[in-house]
Every structure is written in structure tokens, then in C-alpha cells.
Amino acid sequence: MNEFITRLKQRKLVQWALAYLAAAFALIQVLDVVASRFDWPVQIERIIILALAVGFVVALVIAWYHGEKDRQKVSGAELLLIALVLAIGGGLLWRFARVSPAASPAPLASNSVGATNASAVALTNIPAKSIAVLPFVNMSGDPRNEYFSDGMSEELLNALAQVDDLKVAGRTSSFYYKGRNEDLRTIGKALGVANILEGSVRKQGNEVRITAQLIRVSDDTHLWSHAYDGNLSDVFQLQENIARAITDQLKVVLVGAQKTRLVAVATTNAQAYTLYLKATDAFNRRDYKAMGDAIGWLNQAIALDPNFARAHAQLAMIHALGWANYGSSQTEAERQARLAMALDPSLAESAAALGIVARDQRRYLDARAASDRARALEPDDASVNLYDAQLLIVTGYTRQGIASLDRALAIDPMLPNALHWRAMQYLDAGDFDAAERLWKRAGELHLSFANAGLALLAKDRGDFAKARALALPYLLGGSGDKDCLKARAVSAPIFLAGVDGGDAPARAKALAVVEECLAAKPAKIPYWVASGLLELDPKRALPIIAQGPTTDEGGIFMRFWGAQGRAARQLPEFPAFARTVGFAALWDKYGPPDLCKKNAAGDYVCK
């Protein structure tokens, strides 16, 4: 044994082994950095690591047979020093290169759509012709002008999004970074873009100065910057100059009318345009308290310029979405949408608004035609894809709906309502972890009903106490569809005790609460009543929902195609229900939905 140890020392086998391992360790760290920068397939790294492992054995064999002391060219101390330097150097390279903003995956991508495979922001293969437009900084010295600087950013984003040869990150995701002072390379990774446009807007009266700069994410290089001066009457030309400079810098291929014009002149009335931007700001922030004002601003804008098509379209969308307590009207939504379409047939927003109105009126054939038109006009608009997904899922075409949802999230990874609808599909598919991640992300993005989704998740996981605690505020808060309850503070907990894991007596008491509400003859069937009936008495639910309308048509019909609606859609009465609500006419034209098929009698039987 002593002789063997002596021979090891003579051949410096231990020193050579340490040196080899240190060199291999350093090489692997360098390889990891290089592979991440150049998007190498993981198989290449694995092959090299296996080769290094084999090489270790070979190195030991060579050291044993050729390592006699008198042939050593490097002393043992030197070998140990080399090993130490290589190990420390490799470790430092790995530490700092891996966590640099340019090389690390962005936490936003992993926390939001990175939680899903279909809608994840790709951190590799980012196209060179891609851009995110960050909110421009308000330099006016007056916070009331914030809507104008945000509006300039959004208008540029919308103009660039029309260019086929350019990928543009969605508005919600880009505006998430407003005021956050994040590293631009981190933002670029999170949004999957190679370039970022940022800038500032100074508005003093009618005078406007817009400063913009284009930055390449990979090396933080300023590709272009310029300041543009003008007044409100020049604002569309200022936007055109900036958009044109960007497409020139990125060498984007323009086709058709875009060769001569990227930014359309929406109105020649500066005051009308300012009112439009104020209303758009309230709409984008879903500032419900300001929605009545937004309707007023848009009506004023239209009075100043009756041919302002985009103002008509925006007004149609606000009315179509029908948020409570601000005087929304489906009739007015349809009227304004048709006026917008007559003035400018290229506007997808007006077509989408018509689709939403038709869906909520159960005119599904009209809704499908309008949605298809909107998507043909704006295939890369996140909201258009979201509205299309909602219609598809509501009418039973779940797989197609998920594809549209994933497209919406690929364009705008932080679109809160898209995250909610995608989470619902994960819940129905039994992927609870993915559903939870998306609902938590939606909550971080201030989606008001994200906790209601988490309540459904807790229920499906069997945590009924948590489900009730999360759902209770929605039944206690506000008014509207809860006004049919005489003593809401008493009735709401009784209802939840029955629908969330209750035994037979508790379910009977919950059903009595539902009947109390129905006896009050509400103008619309509250969503919680329709949903509760699907749970408690599916056979009773069908005629109640069929007579409608409900306070949330999309929400209740979505539930028919998940686990909660299974009992209802398997009832013998369901084919007649499908005819009554308008499903069957749609299915006759577009084919059966995912869970149904047509029998010899012409009825749709669902599983």
C-alpha cells in the first residue's frame, strides 16, 4: 500500500486530477454562458460534458504511465496553483455572467406566461425586427398630462403593430414597466424583443415636444434618438416621423399604403383628439369610476368631429363591455360600432364590439362573423384574440379558444383577463398548479376578480374553508346582482356553505337562498345564482339560464364546458336548451363543439 501511495506521489496523479477537474469545471461554466448567449441546443452541452468525463479517465491513465518525477515539467505546487486559479476563475465567470441582465431569464416571463408552455415568452430566437414601446415620460410638469404622454406611446405602438415585418410587444405588458426603472435588457428578455423604444413628451398648451430613442437590447446600444417639436395639429405627423425612423433603423419591409404612410390622420380636430386620448386612458386603466366621464369625453369628441371613426369605435367598446353603474347600453354600442365601420372599415375594434354585443344577446352566428372579421383585420392584436377566445370557449370550441388565448398571451403576456380565462382552462384540465400561477399573476396585475378564480381552485383542491373565505367578499361587496337578497350578510355564507363542499342539508339551504333571489324577479339572472344552480340542481338550472339574460353571459356559458357543467350538458333536456340559447344554430354551421356530436335526429348529445 505504501508503495502504491509513493508511486501516486511520483507521478503527481492527485495534482493532475485536480488540475483536470478545475479546468473542466471552468470550461463547463464558459460553455454554459456561451450556449445561453448563442441559443445552443442542450444536447451540445451534454455531449461536451460526457466527453470531459471520458477525458478525465484518459488523463489519469496518461498521467500514470508518463508521470515519472524526473519527467515532470511542472512542479506539484505549480499544478495545485493552476488548479486553484482555474476553479476560482471559472466560478467567477459563471457567477457574474449568469446573473447579468443580458443573460438571465426575466422573472416576469417565468412568473406569468412562462408558467405555461403554449403562451410562454420565448427567451431564445428573438427576432431582430422586434420592439417594445415603453410608456413615454411626462415631462410637462403637470401630472394631469399623463394621459397625453401615455397616449403618444400607445399610438406609436398601434402604428408599428400594423407592420407585418415587425413584432411588437402588447400594450399591457409594455406599460407594466411604467415607472419601474428596470434594466432594459431585462425588459427585452421578458417581452421577447430585440429593441426598445423609450422617450418623453413635453406638452405646454398646444405646443408639443416628443423625444424618442431606440435601443438595442443585447448590448444597450442607442441606435437612434431625436427630438420632434410641433403643436397638437402636427401630432400625427410627429408620430409618423418617429415610426418611419424606427422602421428605417430596423430595415423593416413595408408593403402597400405603409410605404407612404404609417400613422393615419384620425381627426383634424386637435381638441377632439385630446378628448379621445383622455377617454382611452380611462378605458385602458379600467378606471370604472371614470367610465361615465369617458363616455362624455368621446361624445364631445364626436360632436367636434362626427367623422372621427376611432372615437366612435372606442365608445362602442366601452358600451359593449357593459361595466355597471355608468350608463352602458348595448343598443348604443351597436349603433356606434356601425357608424365606426361605415367611416373606417379597417378598424377591428368596432367589429370586436359588435361581436361582444351579439355574444351577450346570444346571437352567436352574428358574433362569430364579427369576431372573424375583427381577427382578419387585426390578427396580432391581443384584445381581439382574447375576445375571439372568449366566444369560442363560451360556445364549446374549447381547443380553438385555448389557441386564441395562447396567441393573445404570446402578444401581450400580462393581459390580466387573458390570464384569467387561460387559468380557467387549466383548472378544467386538472392542471391546478398552472391555474394558480396565472391567477396569482393576474392578481398582481390588479385583476379585480382574480381571487374568485383562486376560490374555484381551492374548491377543486378540496379546501372548502379557503374557497368560502375567498368567495365571500364577492357576494358581500357592491350591489347590482346581490340586491335580490334581503339579508346578504346572512344569506351569502349560507349559500357558500352549500355550494362549496356542503352536505345535503347545507345544499338544500343554499338552494333556498337561490330561490329567494329568483322570487324577487331580478331583471337579469345573477351569475352567482346561475352558477349555483349548475352546482345544486342542474335540471332546474337549464330553464332558468335559458330564459336569461344573466349578468355574465360569457362567464356562465364558459362553465358549461368544464367539470361544473358536466351534469347539465349530459341531461336529456340539454339538446333543447342548446337550440333555445342559440348554440345549435352555430354548431349546424361550424360543426359540433369539442364535447358534443350530432345524432340521427339532428340533436347535439354532449359528454
Image (spheres, grey):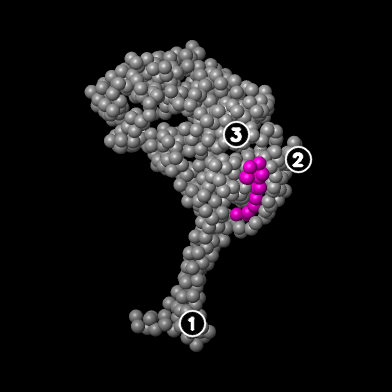
Whether residue 387 is visible, yes or no, is no
Residue 536 vertical placement versus 14 (above, below)? above
* Residue at the spot of label 1: 78
Give the mark, 2 or 3, whose residue is nearer the N terminus.
Answer: 2
* Local SS, label 1: helix
Prevailing secondary structure class for the magenta stretch in the rendered image: strand
Between label 1 and label 3, give the one nearer the viewer. 3
Magenta residues span 203-217
- Nearer-the-camera pick, 67 or 153: 153
- Relative height, residue 325 to residue 83 (above, below): above
Q: Quadrant of residue 151?
A: top right
- Tell me which amino acid carries mark 3: Leu
Give the image location of residue 347, x and y in percent: 64, 30
Q: Which residue is mark 2?
A: 259
Task: Give residue 275's mark.
Answer: 3
Q: Say which quarter of the image contains residue 404.
A: top right
Q: Nearer the observer, disc 2 or disc 1?
A: 2
Q: If you read the primary sequence from the N terminus, does the residue marked by circle 2 or circle 1 appear first?
A: 1
Q: Is residue 323 above or below residue 65?
A: above
Q: Residue at x 53, y 21 (%)?
A: 330
Count the numbered circles shown: 3
Q: Which one is earlier in the sequence, the residue at label 1 or at label 3?
A: 1
Task: Describe residue 106's horizontal placement relative to residue 5 as left or right.
Answer: right
Dot 1 amino acid type: Glu
Disc 2, SS: helix
User: Quick one: quadrant of the C terminus?
Assistant: top left
